[in-house]
Amino acid sequence: MAGTFDQNRDTNRELPGHRRHCTIMLAEDHVHFRHFIKACLEGEDGVTVVGEAEDGLQLLDLLQNGHPDLIIMDITMPRLQGLEAARRIKKAYPDIKVLILTMHNNREYLEEALAVGAEGFLLKEGADTELVGAINKILQGEIYITPLMAKA
């Protein structure tokens, strides 16, 4: 359900292999794609989706109730675009990691995403195979850029 945040999650729980539990918020205006991403993540040990937003403004509102470890967001959303939302989030909450998940195979968007502080850039066409690996790299402090950007 869009516009929700679960405040009762234990975000400090250690998992086998010493991997910390990861909380994620999703910001995607296409509800079916948002549900697809959530379903991909729900099967992963140590990953919990704690909030969903339909646009950048709704995401900013959700952040007033709690902070996830990672936000996965689209670029093109109504009311407040993803890159501007990412800029505001990184300024207000620099500890929150941001992964841009987009259909835009465009080097300018990639460069702007990195300039506003996003830690990852993933094309939607690679989400089914790259998403979990991208999240893991970002949570380990690395920058993730989809190999599909080599086509740009």
Image (cartoon, rainbow, N blue to C red):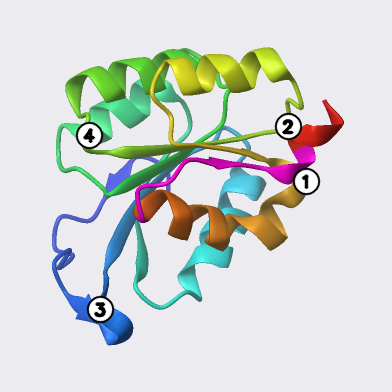
**Label 3 vs label 1: CA separation?**
31 Å
Residue 42 vs 79, above or below: the answer is below
**Label 4 vs label 3: CA separation?**
27 Å
Q: Residue furthest right?
A: 151
**Label 2 vs label 1: CA separation?**
7 Å
Q: Are marks 2 and 3 in contact (CB under 8 Å)?
A: no
The magenta span reads 140-148
Dot 2: few (<14), some (14–19), or many (≥20) neighbours within 10 Å? some
Dot 1: few (<14), some (14–19), or many (≥20) neighbours within 10 Å? some
x and y, in percent, of residue 52 in the image = 40, 44
Identify the disc placed on residue 103.
2
The answer to whether one can see residue 150 in this image is: yes
Residue at numbered disc 1: 125
**Label 4 vs label 1: CA separation?**
28 Å
Q: Residue at x 41, y 17 (%)?
A: 116
Q: Residue at x 14, y 63 (%)?
A: 8
Mark 1, secondary structure of its residue: helix
Q: Are marks 2 and 1 in contact (CB under 8 Å)?
A: yes
Residue at numbered disc 4: 63
Q: Nearer the viewer, mark 3 or mark 1?
A: 3
Amino acid residing under circle 1: Glu
Amino acid residing under circle 4: Leu
Q: Nearer the viewer, mark 4 or mark 2?
A: 2
Identify the disc placed on residue 18.
3
Q: Are marks 3 and 1 in contact (CB under 8 Å)?
A: no
- State which quadrant residue 91 falls in: top left
The answer to whether one can see residue 76 in this image is: no
Mark 2, secondary structure of its residue: loop
Q: Nearer the viewer, mark 2 or mark 3?
A: 3
Between 142 and 93, the one lying in front of the other is 142
